[in-house]
Amino acid sequence: MTLRFSLDTFLREHGLTAYRLVKETEGLVARGSVFAMARGESVKRVDLENLEHIMAALGALTGKTVQVGDLIAGSVEPAQVRRSAADVPYTDDEETNEVLNDHPDILERLSRYNDRKVPS
């Protein structure tokens, strides 16, 4: 599932309209932005300042504290960790990553070397 801005759901659940929210945020958030968010029109980015004004206005209209999670629906599946050619996760060191990619068997070779070493 993907994240979705769910202002429309919040407004319906609280008996509010986008027009009422526009009036409450007048001069702070562009009218078109509020209506677009309320319609859920493929909102790709949300300006944090606008979100703050909208949350404050919704809080004033409902008499309750509004959390960011109240306006976002869905979840994101964890991504696969990128792995090097040596089949281990990439490190924070670019040089190490290059060695792991250029010599995918390096860890196996190192393990064999360590197994041959006789403890002192």
Image (spheres, rainbow, N blue to C red):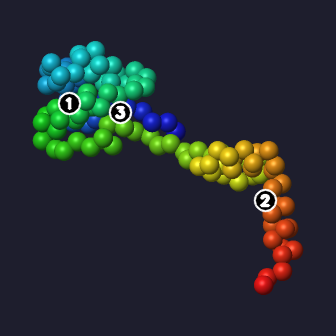
Please tell me how crowded label 1 is: few (under 14), some (14-19), or many (20+) other residues with Cα within 10 Å.
some
In this rendering, the label closer to the viewer, 1 or 3 = 1
Which badge, 1 or 3, is on the more N-terminal residue?
Answer: 3
Q: Nearer the viewer, residue 73 or 15?
A: 73
| Amino acid bearing label 2 | Leu
- Residue labelled with disc 1: 53
**What residue is at 42 percent from the left and 33 percent from the top?**
4
**Residue at point 23%, 16% (across, down):** 31
Image coords of residue 70 (percent x, y):
30, 41
Give above or below for 21 relative to 97.
Answer: above
Q: Is residue 24 left or right of residue 68?
A: left
> Gap in Å between the C-alphas at discs 2 and 1?
53 Å
Q: CA distance from mark 3 to mark 2?
A: 48 Å
Q: Which residue is mark 3?
A: 6
Which residue sits at x=33%, y=43%?
Answer: 69
Mark 2 or mark 1, whichever is nearer to me: 2
Q: Earlier in the sequence, mark 2 or mark 1?
A: 1
Between 56 and 109, which is closer to the camera in this rendering?
109
- Looking at the rendered structure, the number of numbered marks drawn on it comes to 3
Q: Earlier in the sequence, mark 3 or mark 2?
A: 3
Q: Amino acid at mark 3?
A: Ser
Element type where label 3 sits in the image = loop
Confirm whether residue 83 shows in the render. no
User: Where's the C terminus, which quadrant?
Assistant: bottom right
Q: Position of residue 111 (x, y in %)?
A: 81, 67
Residue 52 visible in the current orientation: yes
Which residue sits furthest bottom? 120
Is there CB contact under 8 Å for labels 2 and 1? no
Residue 20, given in percent of the width and then of the height, sits at 16, 23
The residue indicated by pointer 2 is 107
Q: Secondary structure at mark 1?
A: helix
